[in-house]
Amino acid sequence: MMSTTYSFIFSFVCTLILCDANSISLPKLYEMDDPEECADRNGIFCKVDVILSPYNYSQDSAIWIKIQEFNKDYRYFQRNKLKHGRCFYKEQAESIEDILSNNYATRYLNYSLVAKANYTSCFEKDQLILNELDKWDIISISFGILYGSFVIISTIYMVVYKYENKITKTLNIFSLISSWKELQKPIKNEDFQSLKSIQGIRTVTMMFIISAHAFYGNMFLFLKNPEFLENIYLNLILRVAVTVYPFLVQTFFLISAWLLSVQLIKIIRDHKELTLRHVMIILVSRYFRLMPLILISIAVHRSNLAYDFISYVNQDILKREVDNCRFFWWKNLIFIQTFFEPTNICSSVTWYVATDYQLYTITVFLFYVSHKLKIERRFLMIFLVIVSVIIQSAVISSTEFLGIMRLFPKTANLGDELVSKAFTLSYIPIWCNAATYMLGVMFGSIYSWQREEKISHDNLKKIVWFCSFFGLPIFAMFVTSFMYEIRWFEILVSVFARPIFSAGIGIGILGMATGYGGQIYPHRLLPIFCTGCTNLHDI
């Protein structure tokens, strides 16, 4: 009994801290020749996939047993699939397969393993970079220069000519000085003052997103020390902490829906109705606010210049992005890049804009139908959430993928995450984010209601607020930090983890907007920090 207790305690402690009991030496997961030296000798650099299997089909070697144990554990990279980068002379180009076969035939026999090596892609430095810019590059650069010149001219003109006329009124819009003065004007809008906490939440989320792309980017590249990442996932606390990354985008969906609901409720209160004209103005205005950034994104990602900002050994990943933007750019203009072959998204990071605009449109029409047909909004919202739950459950139960997207070492595959089923079926579709959006509408409605019916404050409510604000997101991250063999449990986590996380954030924002925040409230904004982080995120 005592030994069992000690064993349990040791196992639990090893979960919280890093205990390395894997003393058996395994083949290195990543090996790479120096790409720059390869380029200097005018060589060809190839990415090589190496698949290991037991020698003479002997399944009982200690090395193979350990590899199988690692492969079953989501916290480890798959150790029978190695990633190598090899340099070859140009005269060897026609015989690379034979060279790899000979080199790897006996390479791992001392591990009682045999290897099968196949090259996936080969590169010469500057091979994919075109010397000449195409016409669209020239048009984009010319437009950028013209716009920049117009801004400079407008700024100078407004400094020299102080009097107002039709020309100055137009140029004033583009003047940097006038824009700066507008930014400095105090905003006295009551909603802006009450919802300043949203700025703080967005800023913190932006910083987490920046760190998330840096952290997860390492999982898809050649790593000198992959064990470092594995140790993070072996530590329960660290694993829960990094599990926040796939949830971060939910914050933006929540805030988008919140602000939209406040706007729509205000229109209904002021005009006593919500007309089709209001609906079209809202949707068209949002479309044209987003379109300049979308056009810039398309121009940048389809350009030959993009190759100048990435190592030539990763040009295969970039080429897919550039090709997508050259053939599927039109989907971004109408925000349907998450539909119709979502693996071919131009500028993959813009999936959020498309999904948000789709949910934004649905929500606007939900308010319109509710107002016109005199149907309570909560019934339509509940119906939409139920439909999204049914679709998510059906998709997960009828397809073979892991459910909610998690970026674990086991699923990392050198940049292929953006075309995985977890990404295209359980992360970017509207049905995966509809529940969070409806929560945003609910919190926005509660916020608008409490402005007239003030919510009473007491210490018990503040304690509940504090526990919900921090407890619900942590709980969602905790249950998602594991992978479950029981399919129905995986479905539950996939369907409800995101709304639970979002509910915690929504409760936090609502509390700070209504005075529940206590000592957290004064530190919610940090204007200088917010401005700097926002600009960094935009860069």
Image (tube, helix red, strand yellow):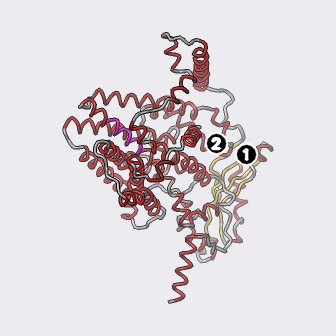
Q: Nearer the viewer, residue 313 or 290?
A: 290
Quarter the C terminus occupies: top right
Q: Which residue is mark 1?
A: 44
The prevailing secondary structure element of the residues shown in magenta is helix
**Nearer the N terminus, badge 1 or badge 2?**
1
Amino acid type indicated by mark 1: Ile
Q: Quadrant of residue 285?
A: top left
Q: Which mark is residue 315?
A: 2
Q: Which residues are magenta?
A: 253-264
502 and 90: which is toward the camera: 502
Whether residue 491 can be seen here: no
Helix, strand or loop for disc 1: strand
Asked if residue 106 can be seen in this view, the reply is: yes
Residue 95 against residue 136 in the figure, above or below: below
How much space separates mark 1 and mark 2, taking CA atoms? 13 Å
The answer to whether 516 appears left or right of 418 in the picture is: left
In the image, taking residue 251 as reference, residue 220 lies left or right, namely right
Q: Residue at x 63, y 72 (%)?
A: 20
User: Where 526 sits versus 7, above or below?
Assistant: above
Query: On the picture, is 138 further left or further right than 500?
Result: right
User: Quadrant of the rendered structure where residue 396 is?
Assistant: bottom left
Confirm whether the magenta stretch covers residue 137: no
Q: What is the crowding at mark 1: few (fewer than 14 residues within 10 Å), some, or many (at least 20)?
A: many
